[in-house]
Image (tube, coloured by chain):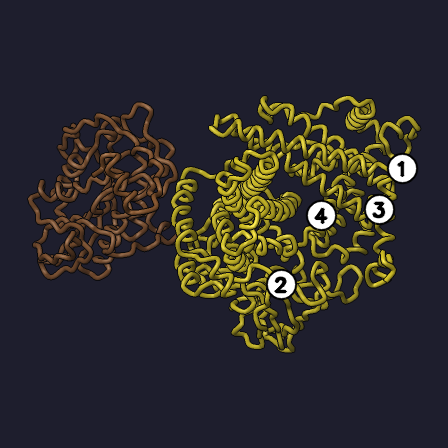
């Protein structure tokens, strides 16, 4: 069933590690994925990925195998690493995308913004008032902080992604509450208009949004639809006159919900599906003005952190939305939502790298001055390890942020996996770093006066919103599996016509034979990585090879059911994150060494240390995924979870018996 | 006749709260490489005052001037972003820059003020890195113009300027005729923050380039710095129990 006329010898089969049963798997993954779309809807996994998938299966069957080999390959490093391949074009050398004018402009913008946040903005006050002080908001508007990426001819500052990243880094360093107020407005609130708005929509709305005269909010989440964003129930129906959509529904936890004038609202609409001839609910994005009438909001939510940011419920009751206010395509709302979230992700990594910089300075200041047991505490190994880990985590996050913003500015459209990785990494790194900062500071860290506890409270939400880290891990893994699966499928097709694809097949056979024999398959980062980092470069290459093999193994073992193997997906994602992190610091440290920076040797140590530990973590994950005891552990965890759920809590009786 | 143009003369100084200023190993000066530089705070106040006067329509044009290496253009741009109309960068670099002192700068500013027919020259009262407090006064003397130094309040009244000066004894109010030189003191105003849109607009404003030689100024310094030392490290204090003990100790170490 695999092949046409060529006989698949057992030897060939083994060499290619393709089980005869593989044939339908790719198609099955696709079908199962469509059925299970809603499971992972909020991560961009769903429609965007599945649409790609649907296209993939139909065209693959039509295209000749030879043509397929020449089809456009993704330039994304992450996509290729899932296939066990290295495409260095987006990661080496470390992107440097600003021309002289952009660099000079940015250098002029940094001091006034820094000065403002150091001298005028009062984060403690904003936190205790549970709002951004009015005078501060006014100054931020005057400063132009609300339209950083709006084009200059529409009243904004017209920054590129890299320039924007540098400025949000400053905001992140000082006040995340203000950061979210600004971010909810421009990074997601009206980003849709920037990305897919019509010229008329842009001209109408952007100027006032850029000056902060009107504020924006992104309205997707509902009480019953968080991660499962495709299940939203807010409804848009076409009015009888055909000139308006009537919007009905309620959204929760909307940042700027109580302040905004302009809302990007996602609602479902029943539409005729061309293929099946049946009515289907599709999501559409709308630009809704509060002035349309029927828009109300609830009181500000009481939160653990980012208290200065307004979070409220927003209700839409028979709101008439002119048909001109559809954002993007009718029925294409899900893709719009995912594009918006995807596009703004790098900003989070940039902001959090600033936050970490700030708390590390505090921790270092304390460690360098506090004397205990007769010595400054930074002389003790326990503290040294903490400071070192904090520094490495910040270095990786910062490197990711600027690599991704650089890739985006260079025109890459293929950065969704890296962006998701950076969000997961940055939010977890920032939490760890701030937690350790409090630890280094001891009791002082716990006191309100130091300001670090506020940062800790502010940070917690970053692992939750804009796609929970758990969902994003599934997204990273599934996206990666899909591409790896396509690669395997193309091999399958090649097998149908081995003579015509002798080269491709021979290459694969040799590669796999070498791997089985434990030899290097020729994958290398030589030429990309600085010679002084070649050992770490080799670790990265080995890790990629093992990772690629593991990905294939998992696909072959689980087939379409990989979708349900979340224990596996999490570990694959964790390895992908560590791998991307290794490569990112190799790139940055290589650049510093090549350019002879004063800090190059220090960065070299950061890079090498990171790579050693990341390699160990990846190899452990790879080993676990092969081991049967880990499979048993997964089964056990499932059973434990089932038991406590059934019991409504802890199952084991009290040690005392009562 | 309403005053046409006001010259604000800026100085680029070492950042005031920079953690560590070190003396060079050869004691010839202070290490400036890698130390963050920015506009002298008193010069910021001077710029603010000039821009305010323009906003109140007392003057037509504010020109920001500074002498120094290329880095100085950033300072001029900040002044442009605060509201100055155009800039003049007098290029001085290398050995000339190291030897440049208030007299050379005053000569340059005086030559420019005359050349461009300025009605007012406003400077910061002193630079926070060298604390000379001489440039304004020397500029006025070279031009033979009246001077209103340590200004904490400036009002233009027809052809004259009323200046409230902060002096050791309190406040002194004087009236001087224009053209005049003013130097800004701390309480004159609170400088505005440059907004991002203004920084963008400032990119289109012109900064003219020239050299001291173009103005016929000789940069040779009459001052030679012999040595720069760090202040002596503060010695530990000693606590005493009674006043008698204190007197005894002071007598013992020869203080009284």
* Helix, strand or loop for disc 4: helix
Residue B248 at what x, y percent from top left?
A: 26, 40
- Element type at marker 3? helix
Q: Mark 3 — residue?
A: A634
Kindly identify which residue carries mark 2. Answer: A285
Disc 3 with disc 4 on a shared chain: yes
Q: Dot 2 lies on which element? A: strand
User: Mark 2 or mark 3: which comes first in sequence?
Assistant: 2
- Which chain hosts label 2? A
Nearest the viewer among B220 and A41 is B220
The dot on residue A175 is: none
Q: Is residue B50 above or below residue B77?
A: below
- Check whether the beta carbons of the residues at disc 2 and disc 3 lie within 8 A of each other: no
Residue A3 visible from this viewpoint:
yes
Residue at mark 3 to residue at mark 4: CA–CA distance: 17 Å
- The location of residue A463, given as percent across then percent down, is 64, 52
In the rendered structure, the residue with mark 3 lies on which chain? A
Per the model, the C-alpha gap separating discs 4 and 2 is 26 Å
Question: Residue beneath label 1, please?
Answer: A2
Q: Are marks 3 and 1 on the same chain?
A: yes
Chain A representation colour: yellow
Q: Quadrant of the N terminus of chain A?
A: top right
> Mark 4: few, some, or many residues within 10 Å (few <14, many ≥20)?
many
């Amino acid at each position: 069933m695999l092949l046409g006329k060529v006989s698949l010898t057992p030897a060939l089969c083994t060499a290619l590690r393709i089980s005869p049963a593989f044939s339908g798997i790719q198609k099955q993954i696709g079908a199962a994925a469509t059925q299970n779309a809603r499971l992972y809807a909020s991560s961009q996994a769903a429609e965007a990925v599945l649409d790609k998938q649907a296209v993939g299966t139909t065209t693959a069957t039509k295209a000749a195998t030879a043509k397929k080999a020449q089809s456009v390959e993704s330039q994304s490093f992450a996509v290729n690493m899932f296939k066990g391949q290295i495409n260095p074009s987006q990661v080496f050398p470390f992107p440097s995308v600003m021309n002289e004018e952009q660099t000079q402009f940015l250098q002029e913008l940094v001091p006034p913004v820094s000065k403002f946040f150091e001298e005028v903005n009062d984060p403690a006050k904003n936190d205790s008032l549970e709002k951004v002080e009015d005078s501060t908001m006014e100054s931020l508007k005057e400063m132009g902080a609300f339209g950083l990426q709006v084009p200059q001819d529409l009243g904004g500052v017209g920054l590129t992604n890299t320039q924007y990243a540098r400025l949000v880094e400053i905001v992140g360093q000082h006040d995340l509450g203000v950061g979210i107020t600004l971010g909810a407005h421009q990074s997601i609130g009206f980003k849709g208009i920037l990305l897919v708005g019509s010229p008329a929509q842009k001209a109408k709305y952007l100027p006032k949004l850029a000056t902060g005269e009107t504020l924006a909010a992104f309205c997707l989440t509902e009480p019953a639809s968080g991660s499962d964003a495709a299940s939203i129930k807010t409804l848009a129906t076409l009015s009888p006159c055909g000139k308006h959509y009537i919007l009905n529904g309620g959204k929760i936890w909307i940042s700027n919900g109580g302040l905004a004038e302009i809302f990007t609202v996602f609602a479902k609409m029943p539409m005729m599906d061309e293929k099946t001839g049946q009515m289907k609910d599709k999501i559409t994005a709308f630009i809704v003005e509060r002035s349309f009438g029927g828009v109300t909001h609830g009181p500000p939510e009481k939160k653990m952190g980012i208290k200065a940011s307004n979070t409220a419920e927003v209700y839409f009751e028979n709101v008439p939305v002119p048909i001109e206010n559809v954002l993007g395509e009718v029925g294409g709302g899900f893709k719009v939502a995912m594009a918006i979230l995807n596009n703004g992700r790098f900003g989070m990594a940039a902001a959090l790298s600033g936050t970490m910089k700030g708390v590390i300075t505090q921790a270092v200041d304390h460690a360098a001055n506090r004397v205990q047991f007769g010595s400054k505490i930074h002389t003790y190994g326990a503290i040294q390890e903490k400071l070192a880990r904090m520094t490495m985590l910040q270095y990786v996050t910062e490197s990711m942020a600027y690599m991704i913003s650089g890739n985006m500015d260079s025109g890459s459209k293929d950065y969704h996996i890296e962006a998701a990785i950076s969000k997961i990494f940055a939010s977890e790194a920032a939490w760890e770093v701030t937690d350790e900062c409090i630890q280094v500071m001891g009791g002082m860290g716990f006191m309100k006066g130091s300001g670090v506890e506020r940062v800790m409270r502010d940070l917690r939400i970053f692992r939750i919103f804009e796609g929970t880290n758990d969902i994003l891990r599934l997204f990273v893994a599934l996206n990666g599996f899909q591409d790896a699966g396509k690669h395997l499928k193309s091999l399958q097709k090649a097998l149908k016509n081995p003579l015509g694809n002798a080269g491709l097949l021979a290459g694969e056979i040799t590669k796999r034979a070498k791997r089985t024999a434990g030899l290097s398959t020729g994958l290398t980062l030589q030429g990309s990585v600085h010679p002084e980092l070649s050992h770490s470069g080799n670790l990265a290459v080995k890790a990629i090879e093992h990772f690629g093999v593991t990905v294939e193994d998992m696909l072959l073992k689980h087939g379409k059911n990989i979708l349900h193997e979340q224990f596996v997906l999490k570990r694959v994602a964790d390895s992908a994150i560590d791998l991307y992190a290794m490569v990112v610091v190799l790139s940055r440290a290589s650049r510093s060494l090549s350019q002879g920076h004063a800090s190059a040797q220090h960065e070299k140590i950061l890079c090498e240390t990171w790579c050693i530990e990341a390699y160990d973590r990846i190899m452990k994950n790879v080993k676990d995924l092969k081991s049967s005891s880990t499979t048993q552990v997964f089964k056990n965890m499932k059973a434990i979870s089932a038991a406590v759920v059934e019991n409504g809590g802890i199952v084991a009786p009290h040690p005392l018996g009562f | 006749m309403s005053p046409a143009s006001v010259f604000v003369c800026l100085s680029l100084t070492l950042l005031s709260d920079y953690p560590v200023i070190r003396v060079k190993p050869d004691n010839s000066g202070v290490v400036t490489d890698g130390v963050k530089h920015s506009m002298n705070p008193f010069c910021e106040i001077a710029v603010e005052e000039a821009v305010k006067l323009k906003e109140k329509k007392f003057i037509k044009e504010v020109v920001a001037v500074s002498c120094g290496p290329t880095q100085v253009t950033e300072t001029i741009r900040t002044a442009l972003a605060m509201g100055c109309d155009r800039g003049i960068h007098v290029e001085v670099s290398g050995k000339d820059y190291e030897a440049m002192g208030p007299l050379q700068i005053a000569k340059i500013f005086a030559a420019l003020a005359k050349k461009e027919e300025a009605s007012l020259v406003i400077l910061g009262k002193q630079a926070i890195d060298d604390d000379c407090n001489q440039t304004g006064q020397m500029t006025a003397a070279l031009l033979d113009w009246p001077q209103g130094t340590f200004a904490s309040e400036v009002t233009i009244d027809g052809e004259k300027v009323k200046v409230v000066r902060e002096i050791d004894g309190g406040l002194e109010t004087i009236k001087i005729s224009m053209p005049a030189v003013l130097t800004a003191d701390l309480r004159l105003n609170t400088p505005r923050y440059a907004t991002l849109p203004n920084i963008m607009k400032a990119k289109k404003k012109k900064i003219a380039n020239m050299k001291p030689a173009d103005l016929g100024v000789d940069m040779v310094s009459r001052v030679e710095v012999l040595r720069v030392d760090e202040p002596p490290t503060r010695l530990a204090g000693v606590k005493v129990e009674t006043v008698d003990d204190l007197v005894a100790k002071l007598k013992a170490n020869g203080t009284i």
